[in-house]
Image (cartoon, coloured by chain):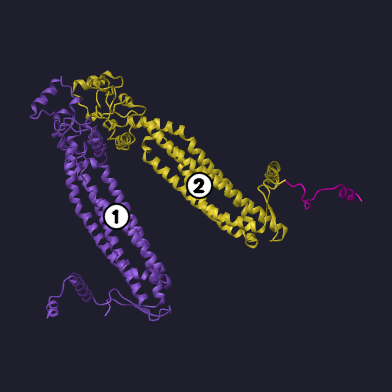
Chain colours: A purple, B yellow
Amino acid sequence: MPFMPVKFNLQKRVKLAQGLWMLYWFSVIAGILIFSLGIFFKIELRKRSEMMDNNESHLVPNLLILVGLLACGLNAFGGKVCHDSLDPIKFSKWKPMLKTYLLLCCGFNVLLVLVSLLCFLMQFSVYLTLAEGLSYAIRFYKDTDTPGRCFMKRTLDMTQIEFHCCGNNNFRDWFEVQWISNRYLDMSNDVVKDRVLSNVEGKYLMDSVPFSCCNPGSPRPCIQHHLTNNSAHYDYDHRTEELNIWTRGCLEALFSYYSSLMSSIGVFVLFAIILESVDMAGLKYLSTALETMAEPENPECESEGWLLEKGVKETFSDLLTKLKTLGRTNQVEGGDAPEANT
Amino acid sequence: MAVGKVTFSKVEREKLAEVLWLLNWISVVTGTILFGLGLFLRVEIHKWQEVMSEQGILYVPHMLITTGLAACCINFFGGKICLDCADTNKFLRWKLVMMPYIICTFFFTSCVLAGALMCYGIRSQMEESLFMGLRNAMRYYKDTDTPGRCNLKRTVDLLQIQFQCCGNTGYRDWFHIQWISSRYLDMSSSAVVDRMRSNVEGKYLMDGVPFSCCSTFSPWPCIQQHLSTSSTQDKQSQQLNLWRRGCRQALLDHYTGIMQSIGLTVLLIWLFELLVLTGVRYLQTAMENVLRLGDPESESDGWILENSLAETARSNFNIIKNLGKCYQVDDDPNINVPTAAAEEELPS
């Protein structure tokens, strides 16, 4: 008893072949899109790899690129098979390969499910990498003369300007690090000397933030220095002032950007999985419809197409017995040997 | 003596019609490109309209948008005509429309050329507009509580950050204006009051710049205040960590670049349109001559102008002169003009 059988006459077969050919070409476009999304994600990670201490994992974009290329190849082949399916001579070329091709598509679908899962789960890894990377970035902000870290200041400034954020969790992170290099501090100045001496580690800490934390939308000129000292500025209360500097932390800003990117890619891959499954079902119907034609010379005859030759349970039990016998090919049956001897 | 005379056989006429049909469809595409370019320029100008003093610059993108739309319509119509022109019977339908259509297309093609030339000629007007606009924007930078100017501070800050520029011509422009609002100045402080009194107009001027002038490329933290007397700079070469370029120059370069590329594209489109126009004129004259000869299979001549340029100009001028004379009566036979014979009859 075949699973989900459908009767086909010539017109239905032609329609199925044409519709399936269109669908395969849509799937090729979807494959190209997945490939470009993978490349875009890789570029975005590379652009801000300094914020992640160059430690970020490129597993997801690399997988996306691979899967995109595979999708293009497999679906183009499927489209070619559909195009040739209505010509019996051309189709007989492809017939023996169809079973392997459908198995490959099944495996590819499983890979797509894995990639989609990774898109959602790897967001945790991105969060942790960002948290660690940003704390290093803030610490090495002043080291513009250390090889390997010269551009940290510029990258962090541009990130804070672009993402409208300040510091790791908030602007107070800047109060805990010395972000002005000793090269630019006038050590002969008493105020500077006092401040350095009053700190346990000899760091020059102050309640100021870099200029990139300034919010251009603030109605008053930016207050960067003595942020917690209300009397240092006229008509200023640091508890109620919200527009002066960005209040969001860069960890939150960057993570929300990357997580929305990864979530959208994950949703698109799910859509691609559905498209691939429909393609596979259509191809199975088409191939079985063409195989079960009662008179192969008469194209007008009716035929039947199905998804599985037997029911679902029977197919599974067949598959299990096949797997079991595969494992037993090298075992010699215990009962035969003693019988042969006697 | 016809200008540009070419003889066409029947096969050549049909081929010309087909080629022109295809070219007209390509012209529809170039018309959409023209429309798109106009729209793009409009959006770009709109982005920084607040720092431009006059809105007259908008006529360039508006011209491009209208010519783009006109191109689509005219060439769509032209494609239809050219397809019918291959056959003499169908051509009869369009015979009367062809001449006005060609004149229309000629005017429209000159508009495209005007649009292209405008793109190159607008630079000086834009520079003037940017100079005045930026000067006003910087003057009203501090007026974040005045309705209509609340966003100028934000616009100028974003402009300086994005285009990596400071001030109108340079960072010193900020020294001549009061960019900190009096609302945020402590009037009870003697330092503030002294500074304001020492200025003729009572403005609080200082040698400092807003934070958006700070350069992200500088290796040391941004110094915005006391720029004329910075002692920390003595250790380094006298390089300031502010953007060096003036915003007027930055914006001018940005817009000139865009308009030069747009102008070049529009010139190319104009050349293409001219080609199509010439082809349509040849087709029209060839088909008219075929009708005049009476035999659809015969060869016919096509030209750009029937007589030489001077004669055509003279005849057109005469037509325009006679248009003005339509109510003068010189040769009308129905008017009763007293003659010598009638006068002689009376006495007898």
Q: Quadrant of the C terminus of chain A?
A: bottom left
Q: Nearer the viewer, residue B3 or A221?
A: B3
Q: Nearer the viewer, residue B308 or B324?
A: B308
Residue B255: give x, y in percent of width and height: 41, 37
Q: What is the distance, in whole Å, between disc 2 and disc 1 at their CAs?
A: 47 Å
- Examine the rendered structure and indicate whether residue A83 appears above or below residue A128: below
Q: What label does residue B67 carry, if any?
A: 2
Residue A260 visible at all: yes
Q: Tell which residue pokes out farthest to the top in this image.
A: B198
The amino acid type found where label 1 is placed reads: Leu
- Examine the rendered structure and indicate whether residue A31 appears above or below residue B192: below
Toward which corner of the image does residue A45 lie, by quadrant? Answer: top left
Q: Nearer the viewer, residue B284 or A266?
A: A266
Residue B54: give x, y in percent of width and height: 42, 35
Residue A2: give x, y in percent of width and height: 28, 78
Q: What label does residue A66 carry, if any?
A: 1
Q: Residue at x 33, y 69 (%)?
A: A98
Q: Is the residue at mark 2 from the same chain as the one at mark 1?
A: no
* Residue B330 drawn in magenta: yes
| Local SS, label 1 | helix
| Local SS, label 2 | helix
Position of residue A96 in the picture relative to residue B280 (left or right): left
Residue A282 visible at all: no
Position of residue B300 in the picture relative to residue B346 (left or right): left
Q: Which residues are magenta?
A: B328-348
- Examine the rendered structure and indicate whether residue B270 appears above or below residue B243: below
Q: Residue at x 27, y 58 (%)?
A: A269
Q: Are marks 2 and 1 in contact (CB under 8 Å)?
A: no
The amino acid type found where label 2 is placed reads: Thr
Q: Chain of mark 1?
A: A
